[in-house]
Amino acid sequence: MAEFWRPAGAGVASVVAGVGAAELLSAFLVQNGSPVLTVGALLIDLAPPWLKEAVIGLFGTGDKAFLIVSLAVVVLAGAAVAGWLERIRPPLGRILIGVGGAVGVLAAVTRSGNGIVDALPSVLAAALAILLLGWLMRMLRDTEPTRATPRARVSRRRFVGTTAATAAAGALALVIGQAVAGGFRAASAARAAIRLPRPATTAPPIPAGASFDIPGLSPIITPNADFYRIDTALQIPGIDANAWKLRIFGMVEHEVEVTFAELLGLPLEESTTTLTCVSNEVGGDLIGNATWLGYPIRHLLAKAKPSSDADMVLSTSQDGWTASTPLETLTDDRNAILAVGMNGTPLPLEHGYPVRMVVPGLYGYVSATKWVVSLEVTRFDEHTAYWTTRGWSERGPVKLSSRIDVPAAGRQVKAGTVAVAGVAWSQHVGVSAVQVKVDDGPWQEATLADAISADTWRQWRFAWDATPGAHTLRVRATDAKGLVQTATERDVVPDGATGLHEVQVTVV
Ligand SMILES: Nc1nc2c(c(=O)[nH]1)N[C@H]1C(S)=C(S)[C@@H](COP(=O)(O)O)O[C@H]1N2
Ligand SMILES: [Mo]
């Protein structure tokens, strides 16, 4: 029997270690791409209805647990067989493990919304298991005396110990991976079940004239899936909305606490606001426009009654990240909100589920705290925040800027009338004009699309009479106060880039 159990044990240990490493990787890398759960999901999809019903009939709500236990039994049995096969007919065992990995890859890439990275954990699992099995089998062979080496080179005890240690390390990685990703998966499921209340105040409708129909031009509302994502979170916080609450404290007369249910019960307002990152280079794409559903922070602050010498609100995320926002921007009539919805859905997890801040007119690093859990009313001379302690400016109003979307840089276009178009923004001030310059020619007026509000970007277009040759197009905007966008080039550090976006195109 030892002929079976020792190689079978090596197979099990190798597979457990491979799967454990993959679970750990997937918890950080793709967050919802657990190889085991993905294969489980594939099986659920493939199972015939009678089988599903039979399982639910037998196990009720324990059907998922039943599936996972069955899957584990099948995987472990397969791993034992792989070990044994590898002993009697190498490399059949390793091939069997490879086949298992391929099933994982298949399950991962066929799930809707998944990409090629989702297959990585399964590839890692199989590769590691194959390497480990080869290594343990060599060790097993060395425990057996041969004619040439009558005394075994490795003791059996050492082989058994190494195999057990490999399995234990894999099991530990698996447990850690599950613990790390568990919150995220639970939050994803809870988010999917949320029904946002109707807004008490709907956003002003997007004027029909707010968008031009020009291919390649940024849509006026950025779909959630295309919305840029910037944060320091290696692991997206998986917050239990039922346990979530926001605490407002510090230099206030009354501390205020709001739960998620209480927040949803307040008269929520919809508003369209363009969010921009201070790290957005001239011409960059770290900017997006969304219709947010939320509750004005000024109403909650009015309840808390900040003391008259407070000038800042330090918001803290569940993961410890902080932003320092000027108190007056949260109490004035601009629509600084605690947002729960983004373009008609609950906030996506990566955009701050369940609650984030959105403050028109300020860069994200000083205002747009995702996964927000507390607001401390304080003073700028008492606290600094995550980025302001790392060389970025204490104040971060968004700078007037503009971008050419079409034609894209380096493009070849046909001579004649060419549509040049893009977006311009100066949140909370508004854009009043955009001009385009071709090579060393004069600044010429572009046509502006209608504004949604001063808090959102504005599309513009310019009909260019393009002549053959290489040309440089430049854009600049003027804000509603008459300020003209500067051509002076400045780096994104410490408070946002300046300079004019230009693209080179070839006209043929
Ligand atoms: N908790 C948390 N919130 C955060 C950040 C972060 O790192 N952690 N980054 C901020 C920055 S720098 C920006 S630009 C915006 C980006 O928001 P988005 O990822 O939803 O586009 O979130 C802000 N909120
Ligand atoms: Mo940012």
Image (tube, rainbow, N blue to C red):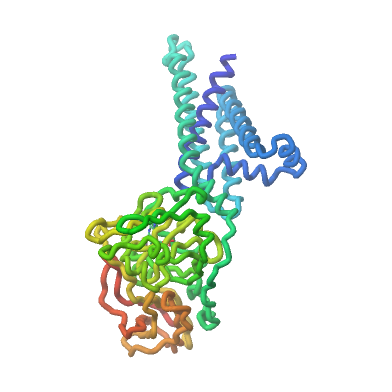
- Quarter of the image where the C terminus is located: bottom left
3 shown above or below 338: above
Residue 508 in view here? no
Residue 445 location (% of width, % of height):
39, 89
Identify the residue at horizontal 25%, vertical 76% (top origin): 488
Name which residue lies at 42% across and 66% down.
299
Task: Place residue 157 in its image quadrant.
Answer: top left
Seen from the viewer's position, the closer of residues 504 and 14 is 14
**Up/down of 442 relative to 211, above or below:** below
Q: Residue furthest right?
A: 50
**Horizontal arrangement in the rendering, residue 61 relative to residue 14 (left or right):** right
Quadrant of res 105: top right
What residue is drawn where x is 53% and y is 41%? 122
When asked about the image quadrant of residue 470, the answer is: bottom left
Residue 229 visible in rendering:
yes
Instruction: Locate the N terminus and report the quarter of the image it occupies.
Output: top right
Point out residue 180 in the picture as x, y percentages from the top left corner. 46, 41
x and y percent of residue 113 in the render?
57, 55
Q: Foreground: 196 or 31?
A: 196
Depth check: 302 or 114 in front?
A: 302
- Give the percent coordinates (x, y) of residue 499: 30, 75
Instruction: Residue at the far front: name it.
Output: 253
Residue shown at the point (35%, 53%) measured from the top left: 321
